[in-house]
Image (cartoon, rainbow, N blue to C red):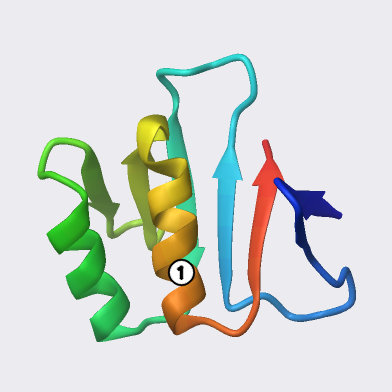
Amino acid sequence: MGFAGFYIEESFEHDCTIKFFSGQPDRMLEVSCNFNQEFVDEIKDKIPRGHRFWDGENKIWLVHSHYRETVKNIALNYFRNVEVVKG
């Protein structure tokens, strides 16, 4: 499976999964990653408050879809395996 030229090996365990919803531009991305404080700090630094929310019950970040590429690039800085999937 791939996204925007980014190849993902299907058999890998993914450290970070970014789920987007095609055709729903106002729907939030669901970002599920292993805990990494530097990743959290960069999410908070690069994505404005009000465009990102921590859902502690489900342990996922909800990020406005406008920041899909930003989130992917941040994740690639901290995780070996990043999966971007259509929900």
Q: Position of residue 36 (x, y in %)?
A: 34, 84
Mark 1 residue type: Ala
Residue depicted at 43% across the width and 78% down the height: 77
Tell me which corner region of the image, top left, top right, bottom left or bottom right, holds residue 65: top left
Residue depicted at 67% across the width and 62% down the height: 83
In the image, 87 versus 2, the foreground residue is 2
Lateral position of residue 2 relative to residue 26, left or right = right
For residue 6, above or below residue 22: below
Q: Position of residue 21 (x, y in %)?
A: 60, 29
**Image quarter (top left, top right, bottom left or bottom right) of the C terminus:** top right
Q: Position of residue 74 (x, y in %)?
A: 39, 66
In the image, 56 versus 16, the foreground residue is 16
For residue 33, above or below residue 27: below
Residue depicted at 21% across the width and 49% down the height: 47
Q: Which residue is mark 1?
A: 75
SS of the residue at dot 1? helix
For residue 43, above or below residue 52: below
